[in-house]
């Protein structure tokens, strides 16, 4: 079975598809492909957008056509090796876990027949890989959550999820970078800004990095710039 396939995305873009599943070995192929493609396309490359198991390659149509692009891509991707993952950075993100900051903690504990402390321990003991950035600037999809913590998305999404909300959906976890609608299960709040467009880099994490969450107290959360202006349930418009 080929490691990848190329699909036309637009007049100046091609998708590189790997096996469509969330797995470390597939993420490793995506990470390997990034520098190989950058080197092969050089000035022809406009943008390269990685995801779980694919890469969107946007090229300059005035300097390169599809035939030339496919030739360059196939030459670059011939160097891929299964199991040769690019090591990313290990990032620690602080989280204030509590029923005040995580309105779905008790629901998860009850559903999974765990204590709240066990939910917290399971979430922070895992090392997560940044598989993709999407949904909103700075929204990093992290996987995989321990099987004991897998939870479906909420039947009715919240209208306003606060910035810094740490949440779970299925086998993924994430930190909301800004106030937005959302249907993930909130278990805590992170004071670390996940997207600052004026900074370089704009995000504390990148695709391929590893993330581990570290529990902090309420006072530490506030000291680090976190805010608890309103109860999350009221802020989301739900009834307590």
Image (cartoon, rainbow, N blue to C red):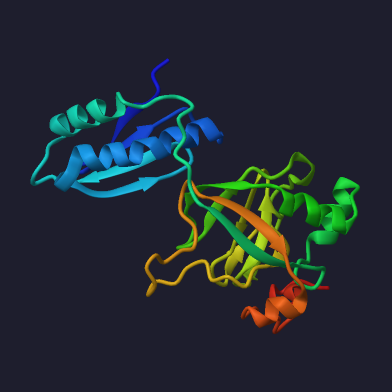
Which residue appears at 44% of the width and 44% of the height?
Answer: 51
Q: Does 68 sit left or right of 182 as displayed?
A: left
Expressed as whole percent of the image width and height from the top left, the position of residue 24 reads 55, 35
Marks counted in the figure total: 0
Residue 157: tell me if it is visible.
Answer: no
The answer to whether 84 is drawn above or below residue 216 in the figure is: above
Q: Which quadrant of the figure contains the N terminus?
A: top left
Q: Residue at x 53, y 55 (%)?
A: 140
Nearest to the observer: residue 191 or residue 19 = 191
- Front-lying residue, 207 or 170: 207
Closest to the observer: 223 or 5? 223
Q: Would residue 167 be visible to someone looking at this image?
A: yes
Q: Which residue lies most toward the top here?
A: 1
The quadrant in which the C terminus is found is bottom right
Name the foreground residue: 200 vs 59. 200
Task: Tell me if 200 is positioned left or right of 108 in this view.
Answer: left
Task: Give the left or right position of residue 170, taking residue 119 as reference.
Answer: left
Taking the spot 23% from the left edge, 26% from the top edge, the residue there is 75
Q: Is residue 50 above or below residue 97?
A: above
Single out the residue that lies furthest toward the bottom. Answer: 229
Res. 214 image quadrant: bottom right
Say above or below: 212 vs 15: below
For residue 177, what is the image quadrant?
bottom right
Residue 62 spot, x, y in % from top left: 8, 46
Q: x and y percent of residue 79 in the render?
A: 31, 26
What residue lies at 51% left-to-right and 30% top-to-bottom?
Answer: 25
Where in the figure is residue 195, as x and y percent of width and height?
47, 68
């Amino acid at each position: 079975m080929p490691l990848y396939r190329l699909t036309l995305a637009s007049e100046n873009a091609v998708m590189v598809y790997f096996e469509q599943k969330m797995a470390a070995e597939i993420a490793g192929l995506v990470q390997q492909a990034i520098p190989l493609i950058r080197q092969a396309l050089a000035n022809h490359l406009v943008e390269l957008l990685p995801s779980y198991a694919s890469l969107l390659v946007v090229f300059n149509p005035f300097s390169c056509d599809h035939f030339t692009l496919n030739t360059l891509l196939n030459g670059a991707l011939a160097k891929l090796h299964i199991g040769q993952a690019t090591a990313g950075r290990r990032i620690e993100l602080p989280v204030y876990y509590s029923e005040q900051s995580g309105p779905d903690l008790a629901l998860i504990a009850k559903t999974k027949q765990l204590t709240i402390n066990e939910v917290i321990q399971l979430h922070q003991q895992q090392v997560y890989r940044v598989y993709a950035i999407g949904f909103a600037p700075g929204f990093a999809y992290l996987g995989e959550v321990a099987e004991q913590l897998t939870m479906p998305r909420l039947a009715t999404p919240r209208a306003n999820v606060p910035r810094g909300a740490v949440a779970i959906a299925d086998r993924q976890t994430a930190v909301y970078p800004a106030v937005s609608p959302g249907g993930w299960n909130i278990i805590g709040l992170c004071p670390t800004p996940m997207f600052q467009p004026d900074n370089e880099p704009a995000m504390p994490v990148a695709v391929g990095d590893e993330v581990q969450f570290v529990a902090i107290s309420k006072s530490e959360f506030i000291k680090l710039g976190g805010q608890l202006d309103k109860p999350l349930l009221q802020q989301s418009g739900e009834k307590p």
